[in-house]
Image (cartoon, rainbow, N blue to C red):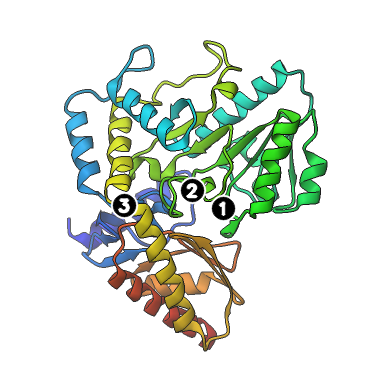
Amino acid sequence: MNPSDITADVQKTEHEHHLPIYKRYPLTLERGKGALVWDYEGNEYLDMLAGIAVNNTGHCHPNVVKAIQEQAGKLIHTSNFYYNKPQSDLAELLSELSGLERVFFCNSGVEALEAALKIARKYGNKKGKKGDIVAVERGFHGRSLAAIALGKEKYQKGFEPIPQGFSTIPFNDIDALEKAITRDTIAFAFEPIQGEGGIHEVSEEFMNRARELCNEHDALLIFDEVQCGNGRTGKYFGYQHFDVQPDIIATAKGLGGGFPIGAAITSEKAAGALDYGDHGTTYGGNPLACAASLAAVNTILDEDLMTQATEKGSYLIEQIREKTQDLDVIKEIRGKGLMIGVELTIPGKPVVEEMLKNRVLSNVTMDTVIRIVPPLVITYEQLDHFTDIFTDAIKHSLNS
């Protein structure tokens, strides 16, 4: 079968059999390396989305590939009735990186967040609390029923009744925060840098006050580090830009270098709320996923990808400002490291579609924010190529 026939067959089969929940671009990818991917026709694309902030170490990093190959030849799955060394090693490493004592492994970000919510709810019940788990507006925590109860209203439509015991306050609103966190509050959960919400950073004042209020009222502080964690912002976790320690972290995406894995990392205090059998998973923490994650995390550390994220992110923002200064369409550039949002004064989708025509993969969120989350291993030459294509795409949209 020739490449074009493969592409046509894949897309036809998709339309016939896959649950119709994704609005896909007409592109069928076959392979990737670093910050590049190729379709079946051999066309090369620069990936500025990295599987939505997943491929932090790049596509098919040799260390991750080797770890998967070697572990797959030894032991893939055991269940959690038994110990396995990759899981034990990874738990120790994440504990060291976070400063928290306990780790629960799962398969995705939403599972990590659900684990965090269950721990918090059990903690609150043991303390006799009757209040909510509070989150912030414009947040995104996944698509389970509990996760959408914490997030945007648009994801709740059609799935009523929404689970009770959750509420939201405006982002970075200190007054609302002080009113919302009371002695009955179970937990306060938010992203240190919002991803789907348009790359918005929490303020230092808000972060510090959140910790103070949680301490005062014995509520758990939960950080959703699914997207901003694992080196993307220039620190291993996004909250580490602040002098604040959470009680629970939910993380995934870049944790596995492209392999599905999630983790809820908790303090001893929070973990102590659970009894044997209160939570669990069949696949979570399997040897194959943990081996892949160990390789990915150690690559982030050994190749100093956090420093690279900081330096490359600063360079990219500077280049975008310089090359678009005469276009008068950039409302704001936000973010840290290689988690960047460029808010436009025009719709972002046509810009993304034009970049795709020029073989650059990108994404728009909140209608006007171009979300830039490339692999941390991206080269400066590739960053320059992106800014050229991005600038041309904006010009094309303005002239259309």
| Foreground disc of the pair 1, 2 | 1
Residue visible at 58% across and 49% down? Answer: 192
Frontmost residue, 296 versus 53? 296
- x and y percent of residue 215 in the render? 70, 32
Other residues around mark 2 within 10 Å, as few (<14) / some (14–19) / many (≥20)? many
Q: What element carries label 1?
A: strand
Badges 1 and 2: C-beta atoms under 8 Å apart? yes
- x and y percent of residue 152 in the render? 67, 49
The tag on residue 227 is 2
**What is the spatial separation of the Cα atoms under label 1 and label 2, in whole angstroms?**
8 Å
Other residues around mark 3 within 10 Å, as few (<14) / some (14–19) / many (≥20)? some
Name above or below for residue 392 compared with residue 73: below
The residue carrying mark 1 is: 193
Residue visible at 39% across and 58% down? Answer: 309
Badges 3 and 2: C-beta atoms under 8 Å apart? no
Residue visible at 33% across and 75% down? Answer: 385
The residue carrying mark 3 is: 304
Q: In this view, does 51 lie to the left or right of 148?
A: left
Q: In this view, does 266 lie to the left or right of 51?
A: right
Frontmost residue, 97 versus 57? 97
Asked whether residue 158 appears in the rendered view, the answer is: no
**Among all residues in the image, which is located at the extreme front?**
243
Frontmost residue, 347 versus 127? 127
Q: Which amino acid does label 1 sit on?
A: Ile
**What is the spatial separation of the Cα atoms under label 3 and label 2, in whole angstroms?**
19 Å
- x and y percent of residue 198 in the render? 58, 60
Q: Which of marks 3 and 1 is nearer the N terminus?
A: 1
Q: Earlier in the sequence, mark 3 or mark 2?
A: 2
Q: Which amino acid does label 3 sit on?
A: Asp
Q: Which amino acid does label 2 sit on?
A: Gln
Name above or below for residue 303 compared with residue 381: above
